[in-house]
Image (tube, rainbow, N blue to C red):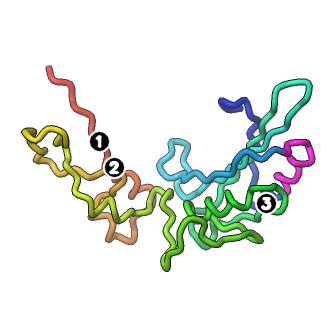
């Protein structure tokens, strides 16, 4: 169970479509969402996986609505990040599949993989944690300087904007997505002064 009180069902990519069809047959006919989650850097592991979650709800006339989430983990490699489409089973799911394809690179066999938000020669998947967004590299980052205080001194230590990995790792093809995510620029906490 989770904070919604939903039942959580783990499934495999081979059983994905059948699990959704079974939930629909049990009365979970209201489609709430379909999302992707990049598992890189999460405490539960799964550095080489993307998780896809569909949430369905059954409305009981005698009680509270009941939710069911179907979770499936698939490989991160774009040529293997593939699931069977549920767009013909669940009204509205095709739109979410296209969004998940755009943002995470997950393809849905039998579905519509046309870009939803943009048309690019080189596909980008901005919600994958190892996707380098060019704007983050090219935008000047003030470091510790307060942008509203013209008299403040900038930090001597070079800091990276959130989401920008260590530049030395970008050119190394042997670096794993987990290592790249671990090097992301983050705000550093100040040590307590005594």
Of callouts 3 and 2, the N-terminal one: 3
In the structure shown, which secondary structural element does the residue marked by tag 3 occupy? loop
Q: In which quarter of the image is the N terminus?
A: top right
On the image, which quarter does residue 28 sit in?
top right
How many C-alpha atoms fall within 10 Å of the one at disc 1: few (<14), some, or many (≥20)? few
- Residue beneath label 3, please? 86
Vertical arrangement, residue 85 with respect to residue 55, above or below = below
**Which range is magenta?**
18-29
Q: Going by the picture, which residue comes out furthest to the top?
A: 194
- Residue lying at 51% horizontally and 45% vertically, measured from the top left: 42
Are circles 3 and 2 on residues that touch, CB within 8 Å?
Answer: no
Q: Going by the picture, which residue comes out furthest to the bottom?
A: 121
Question: Residues under labels 2 and 1: Cα distance?
Answer: 7 Å
Of callouts 3 and 1, the N-terminal one: 3
- Residue lying at 80% horizontally and 39% vertically, measured from the top left: 57
Count of numbered badges drawn on the protein: 3
- Residue beneath label 1, please? 187
Question: Residues under labels 3 and 2: Cα distance?
Answer: 35 Å
Where's residue 116, x and y in %? 60, 66
Where's residue 7, x and y in %? 77, 36
Question: Residue 162 bears which disc, if any?
Answer: 2
How many C-alpha atoms fall within 10 Å of the one at disc 3: few (<14), some, or many (≥20)? many
In the structure shown, which secondary structural element does the residue marked by tag 1 occupy? loop
Question: Residues under labels 3 and 1: Cα distance?
Answer: 40 Å
Q: Nearer the viewer, residue 163 or 80?
A: 163
Q: Nearer the viewer, residue 42 or 119?
A: 119
Of callouts 2 and 1, the N-terminal one: 2
Specify whether residue 183 is painted magenta.
Answer: no
Are circles 2 and 1 on residues that touch, CB within 8 Å?
Answer: yes
Q: Which of 15 and 5 is in front in this view?
A: 5
- Residue lying at 35% horizontally and 65% vertically, measured from the top left: 134
């Amino acid at each position: 169970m989770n904070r919604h009180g939903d039942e959580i069902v783990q499934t495999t990519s081979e059983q994905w479509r059948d699990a959704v069809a079974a939930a629909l047959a049990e009365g979970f006919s209201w489609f709430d969402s379909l999302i992707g989650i990049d598992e890189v850097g999460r405490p539960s592991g799964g550095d080489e996986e993307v998780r896809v979650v569909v949430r369905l709800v059954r409305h009981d006339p005698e009680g509270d609505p009941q939710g069911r989430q179907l979770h499936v983990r698939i490989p991160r490699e774009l040529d293997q990040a593939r699931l069977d489409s549920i767009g013909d089973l669940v009204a509205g799911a095709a739109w979410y599949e296209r969004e998940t394809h755009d943002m995470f690179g997950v393809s849905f066999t039998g579905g519509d993989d046309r870009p939803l938000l943009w048309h690019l020669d080189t596909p980008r998947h901005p919600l994958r944690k190892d996707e380098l967004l060019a704007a983050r590299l090219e935008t000047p980052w003030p470091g510790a300087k307060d942008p509203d205080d013209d008299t403040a001194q900038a930090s001597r230590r070079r800091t990276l904007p959130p989401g920008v990995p260590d530049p030395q790792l970008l050119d190394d093809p042997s670096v794993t997505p987990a290592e790249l995510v671990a090097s992301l620029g983050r705000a550093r906490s100040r040590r307590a002064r005594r």
